[in-house]
């Protein structure tokens, strides 16, 4: 994997955002593989197709690229809210690639993937409608709440200017691919409970430690009035898929 950006591909553009878009899209096309299968390349989608920037010719997974010159924070501005929610509900949401570059050094610094099966309704935030003075007044955008996702949802591909081994990336994808078979509601719960476990920042934890997040989970899932049984259910899901191990007496260990 060559982490250098090629300026000659964007030489005819004067607008900085256009230049960086061309540079980063070209880099992905020339260097990135599919994390979801053995295919060693991704294909750009036809110009003008919204939401999806790349797809895999083998497994048909789709990818949207977001690139910027500074680190990604916990909240990322994204596209229109209602289409985003609908895409999650109907299963057409793409995987997200978050790429950070150094435009002066013309180099990719960081790249991580958030698989589509981690994209749930609870990590999409509705923005305020644009004011009546805006060109698209009334338009409602969305934010992706990266900070609400468990760290497991961020699969590193390039980290600090170094390529992460391909085998690790694909193994990380496979580890949680069981979520693809779950309903939107179910995988949202699994992801949110896992995020709570990760907030504990310890390998060993107790059931009562997760119960401490009861109010937070109730806010994320206001339609569910039985939070503790739901927590236990999701711990069982994580056990069944070898993410955590039950040690007895309400104690667990992250595998």
Image: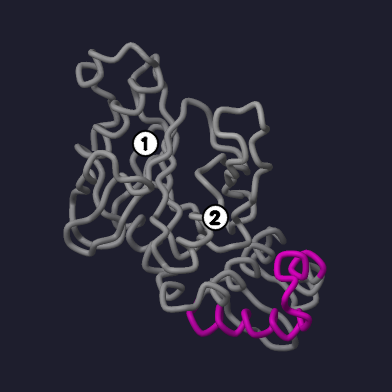
- Of label 1 and label 2, which has the lower sequence position? 2
Name the residue rendered at 68%, 62% in the picture.
202
Quadrant where the image shows the N terminus: top left
At a point 30% along the width and 61% down the height, the residue shown is 36
Span highlighted in magenta in the image: 215-242
Q: Within 10 Å of the Cα at label 2, are there few (<14), some (14-19), or many (20+) other Cα atoms?
A: few
Give x and y (percent) for residue 235: 63, 80
The quarter of the displayed image where residue 185 is located: bottom right
Secondary structure beneath label 1: strand
Q: Was residue 49 drawn as part of the magenta stretch in this picture?
A: no
Residue at the spot of label 2: 82
Q: Is residue 237 magenta?
A: yes
Q: Is residue 55 left or right of residue 172?
A: left
Camera-side residue: 124 or 85?
85
- The disc at residue 162 is 1
Judge whether 162 appears above or below 23 on screen: below
Q: Is 152 left, or right, of 234 in this rendering?
A: left
> Dot 1: few (<14), some (14–19), or many (≥20) neighbours within 10 Å?
some
Q: Up-down: is 117 above or below 108?
A: below
Q: Secondary structure at mark 2?
A: helix
Cα–Cα span, label 1 and label 2: 37 Å
- Whether tag 1 and tag 2 are in contact, CB under 8 A, the answer is no
Q: Position of residue 217 (x, y in %)?
A: 74, 68
């Amino acid at each position: 994997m060559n982490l250098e950006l090629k300026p000659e591909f964007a030489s005819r553009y004067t607008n900085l955002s256009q230049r960086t878009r061309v540079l980063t899209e070209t880099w992905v096309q020339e260097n990135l593989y599919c994390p979801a299968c053995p295919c060693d390349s991704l294909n750009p989608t036809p110009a003008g197709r919204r939401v999806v920037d790349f797809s895999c010719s083998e497994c048909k997974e789709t990818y949207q690229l977001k690139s910027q010159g500074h680190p990604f924070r916990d909240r990322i501005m994204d596209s229109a809210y209602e289409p985003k929610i609908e895409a999650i509900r109907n299963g057409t949401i793409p995987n997200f690639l978050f790429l950070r570059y150094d435009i002066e050094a013309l180099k990719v610094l960081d790249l991580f993937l958030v698989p589509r099966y981690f994209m749930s309704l609870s990590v999409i935030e509705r923005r305020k409608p644009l004011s009546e003075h805006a060109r698209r007044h009334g338009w409602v955008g969305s934010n992706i709440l990266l900070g609400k996702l468990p760290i497991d949802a961020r699969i590193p591909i390039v980290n600090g200017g170094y390529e992460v081994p391909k085998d690790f990336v694909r193994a990380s994808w496979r580890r949680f691919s069981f979520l693809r078979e779950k309903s939107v509601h179910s995988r949202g719960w699994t992801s949110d409970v896992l995020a709570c476990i990760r907030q504990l920042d310890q390998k060993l934890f107790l059931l009562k430690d997760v119960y401490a997040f009861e109010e937070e989970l109730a806010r994320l899932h206001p339609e569910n009035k039985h939070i503790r049984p739901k927590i236990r259910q999701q711990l069982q899901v994580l056990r069944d898929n070898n993410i955590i191990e039950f040690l007895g007496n309400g104690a667990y260990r992250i595998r």
